[in-house]
Image (cartoon, coloured by chain):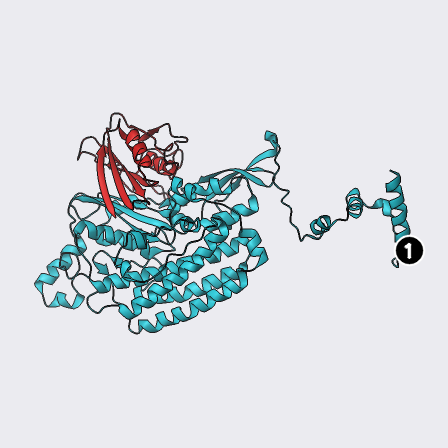
Chain colours: A cyan, B red
């Protein structure tokens, strides 16, 4: 008590003798008094903000009336579409999360049963709208497996070229929206700007920027445009440069690291339990890539690495996407040199419609054209499951055929649907600000979730 | 990569899946169903797709579910990731999963009637009434 009084006098004296003139020290609150009292290094750090103490998480039990349930979404910019989360909050801390989905459900699996096989890709391409070519690829591969046909080498190479470019564009959007959610708004503009390059190439090749319907059962819809190497070379030149810019901006950025490191941990065991594949699994220190382990469409002939990170937090899930872009560009570069000449569609009259010019010359061609476009080609009865490595994980297609020209049952195993189940695990007991980063790191595409 | 497909009776289903989990099938990749309406008996077939990353193999388990007793044990205890998939099958086919933690509709609204992916559920059945359009019955 005595000591306190002495200090107060001392301070009063100091205050009145300062150049600004005296101020009434007794009006300052207790907190600042205390700070002056224990002026050790740690306290100063806390006061100046250079040492951040996590005082959000209360360890003691709180009563029920301090908990509140908040709806996040379905109209919320950081939920990447129409995802709705019921979040149970305790102050700033997320205690429980329940994802509510179905707001974008359009019954695509039912529609798939009513479209013939050659119409199938128009339907599946609209599911995961950020990686439409993968959806087309997996549907086409499953149909080809049922038909037991092999597409020409050039078609395979074009498919790899297009899907790997699509992986780059999809990851760029993931980086962009991820940056936007955390507050790095320039990242959003950069990501979408670079994606535009790839979309322009897609437009040139398939005629559309999204929902291409380019990869079809039996090959691809059209050959690559003239001078496609020039466009691809430009992509290969510009995107690595821009990636360096991103790294300069974000990789050693203390705010970026502070927001992402040790946040939203998703371990390998949790990935296994919830069936999570793709970048999230690879960022948790388990190397699993279907391109290496269960190769499709001749991707085993290309030389590339599977990036692997072990921290299993949001930062590694962000970083692994950047690294995967480099690897995808490596594959694209190799396709440029090794792409074989030849047909881009299978030369099977029952599957591939004849070229338009042939219709005027050949009765046979006219019949096939008519049959394919009215009835569609028939697929032998059976079941097939094919999976490819989409930018978000394993994308599978399960088709049951009853021998007609339409699938009896068409089911798409979307990676986002599965990955969303991990949200309660990632978000539990973390501040609400980290929750947004966690959602962005999983990169859910609601079109793929709801189908 | 190996790819296997087996058929399992419904009363052996839970045990079989449990056995495969112990056997090194770490992940449940997919769970779906097929409606063999008037084509096959029993009517429904549940398809479980397991993946072993250590052995690099896939396994597809087919289980027949009769129309009279649409019940099948839930495998959420073994694979927590089955949760959403079982809810989806419940929503779309009306197959009930016993001991599921929260068996509610997932994609369709909660008050929806019918199961859209059944073969006797026609598509385009819902009448669409646009604003200010003359009423048509």
Mark 1 lies on a secondary structure that is loop
Position above or below: A31 against A296: above
The answer to which of A275 and B117 lies nearer the viewer is A275
The answer to which of A217 and A234 lies nearer the viewer is A234
Residue at (28, 28) in percent of width and height: B70
Q: Residue furthest left?
A: A363
The answer to which of A109 and A187 lies nearer the viewer is A187
The answer to which of A371 and A49 lies nearer the viewer is A49
Q: Is residue A188 shown to the viewer in this render?
A: yes
Residue A343 pos. (x, y %): 19, 66
Query: Label 1, on which residue?
Result: A17
Position above or below: A239 against B123: below
Disc 1 residue crowd, few under 14, some 14–19, many 20+, Cα 10 Å: few
Residue A326 pos. (x, y %): 40, 63
Residue at (45, 46) in percent of width and height: A82
In the drawing, does residue B17 fall left or right of residue A268?
A: left
């Amino acid at each position: 008590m005595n000591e306190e009084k002495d200090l107060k006098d001392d301070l009063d004296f100091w205050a009145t003798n300062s150049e600004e003139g005296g101020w009434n020290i007794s009006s300052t609150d207790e907190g600042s008094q205390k700070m002056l009292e224990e002026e050790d290094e740690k306290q100063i750090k806390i006061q100046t903000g250079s040492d951040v103490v996590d005082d959000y998480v209360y360890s003691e039990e709180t009563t029920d009336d301090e908990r509140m349930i908040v709806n996040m979404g379905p109209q919320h910019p950081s939920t990447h579409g129409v995802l709705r989360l019921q979040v149970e909050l305790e102050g700033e801390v997320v205690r429980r999360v329940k994802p509510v989905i179905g707001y974008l459900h359009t019954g695509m699996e039912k529609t798939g049963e009513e479209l013939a096989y050659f119409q199938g890709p128009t339907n599946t391409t609209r599911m995961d709208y950020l990686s439409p070519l993968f959806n087309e690829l997996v549907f086409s591969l499953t149909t080809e497996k049922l038909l037991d046909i092999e597409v020409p080498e050039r078609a395979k190479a074009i498919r790899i070229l297009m899907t790997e470019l699509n992986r780059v564009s999809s990851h760029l959007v993931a980086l962009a929206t991820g940056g936007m959610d955390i507050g790095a708004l320039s990242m959003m503009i950069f990501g979408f700007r670079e994606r535009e390059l790839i979309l322009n190439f897609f437009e040139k090749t398939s005629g559309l920027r999204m929902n291409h319907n380019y990869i079809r059962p039996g090959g691809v819809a059209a050959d690559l445009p003239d001078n496609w190497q020039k466009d691809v070379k430009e992509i290969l030149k510009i995107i690595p440069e821009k990636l360096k810019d991103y790294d300069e901006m974000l990789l050693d950025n203390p705010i970026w690291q502070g927001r992402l490191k040790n946040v939203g941990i998703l371990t390998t065991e949790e990935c296994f339990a919830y069936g999570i594949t793709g970048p999230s699994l690879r960022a948790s220190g388990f190397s699993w890539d279907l391109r290496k382990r269960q190769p499709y469409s001749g991707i085993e002939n290309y030389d590339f690495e599977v990036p692997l990170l072990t921290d299993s937090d949001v930062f590694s899930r962000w970083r692994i996407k950047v690294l995967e872009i480099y690897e995808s560009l490596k594959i694209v570069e190799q396709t440029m040199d090794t792409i074989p000449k030849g047909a881009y569609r299978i030369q099977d009259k029952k599957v591939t419609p004849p070229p338009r010019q042939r219709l005027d010359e050949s009765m046979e061609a006219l019949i096939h054209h008519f049959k394919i476009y009215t009835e569609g080609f028939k697929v032998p009865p059976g079941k097939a499951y094919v999976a490819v490595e989409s930018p978000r994980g394993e994308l599978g297609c399960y088709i049951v055929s009853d021998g007609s020209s339409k699938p009896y049952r068409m089911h798409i195993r979307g990676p986002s649907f599965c990955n969303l189940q991990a949200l309660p695990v990632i978000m539990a007991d973390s501040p609400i600000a980290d929750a947004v980063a966690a959602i962005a790191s999983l990169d859910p595409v609601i079109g793929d979730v709801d189908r | 990569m190996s790819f296997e497909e087996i058929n399992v009776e419904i009363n052996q289903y839970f045990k079989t899946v449990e056995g495969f989990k112990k056997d090194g099938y770490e992940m449940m990749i997919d769970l779906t169903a097929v409606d063999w309406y008037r084509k096959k008996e029993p009517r429904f077939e549940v398809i479980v797709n397991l993946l072993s990353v250590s052995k690099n193999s896939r396994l597809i388990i087919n289980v027949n579910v009769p129309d009279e007793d649409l019940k099948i044990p839930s495998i959420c205890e073994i694979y927590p990731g089955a949760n959403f998939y079982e809810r989806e099958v419940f929503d779309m086919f009306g197959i009930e999963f016993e001991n599921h933690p929260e068996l509610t509709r997932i994609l369709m609204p909660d008050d929806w009637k019918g199961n859209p992916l059944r073969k006797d559920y026609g598509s385009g059945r819902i009448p669409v009434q646009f604003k200010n359009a003359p009423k048509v019955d």
